[in-house]
Amino acid sequence: MLGTIAPRAMTPHDALGATLLSAFLDLATLHSDGWGYARADASDHPPHLLTGLTPARDAPLVESSAVSLLYLRFASAGAAVAPENLQPFVAEGIAFAHNGALTPRTLALDALTDRERAGLRGTTDSEVYFALVRRALRSLSPTESAVAAAAADVRALYPSACLNAMLIVDGALVVVHSRGTVEPPLAAFARRGVAADDLPPGHGDDYNALATTVLPTGARVVATSGVDTTGWQLLAENAVHVFERSGAARSIPL
């Protein structure tokens, strides 16, 4: 996952620069089960969404936006490589992407109402997590308190799972950093022909660590492991962070 927010609308290339964007897209050689791009122009505009099962290098990342999410999928076992399972998900004016596996999925499904279950399009655990977050956002405020409450509820169900997530809510970039204690899926990487010694950076003990910086372009970026984050600030763990276009930032523990 990679999220950006900037004082003005920019394309991913303009916001990130060619080197960082290229390094992120290179991860699609391993995280190869589809891509997604969600973007929003202002707080009163719902996010636009593009997804695809084509090579990520061919993704038409040409639209400008003030806040955006880029996602490369590594499918969890049992969740088909299919359009309905691609992230980010967009619903109720919110975009959401999650890195991790909530196993077994039925634990989270059982926490949904019949109506919430009927609204699911795909078969991923991440979409169920999103439904729980949306429920909290409908009943709690401010945003960070709602997202933290939902993540804490999911953490109670899955003590070791990675709950890292990025959202676009009301024109802000919202980030959950809660890696859990699950080990990197080295066996799954090996099944794709990538040995441990050949993995991209950030796929060992630092897998799924989230870090942030403000780039020379003026855009703030938050990225998961896999790109070079040397000199970036590691986000506080087990917390929800909110970044605004104005440059303001705040956080709350789960």
Image: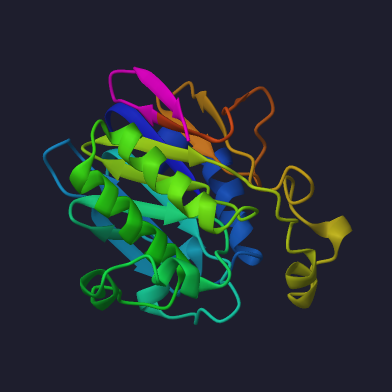
Residue 232: image x %, image y %? 61, 25
Residue 58 at x, y = what percent?
45, 65
**Residue at the spot x=34%, y=57% of the render?**
132
Count of numbered tags? 0
Whether residue 11 appears in this view of the structure is no
Q: Nearer the viewer, residue 192 or 23?
A: 192
Q: Residue at x 23, y 39 (%)?
A: 140
Determine if the magenta segment contains residue 118. no
Is the residue 133 above or below the residue 240 in the image?
below
Residue 250, position as x, y percentages in the image: 39, 21
Residue 230 lies in quadrant:
top right
Q: Residue at x 47, y 40 (%)?
A: 176
Q: Is residue 251 magenta?
A: yes
Q: Can residue 72 be seen?
A: yes
| Colour approach in the figure | rainbow
**Residue 50 or 61: which is nearer the viewer?**
50
- How far across and how far down the image is residue 48, in percent? 23, 54
Give the vertical position of 245 relative to 224 (above or below). above
The single residue placed furthest to the left in the displayed view is: 44
Q: Which residues are magenta?
A: 242-254
Q: Residue furthest right?
A: 197
Q: Is residue 120 above or below residue 22?
A: below
In terms of depth relative to the viewer, which is nearer, 250 or 224? 250
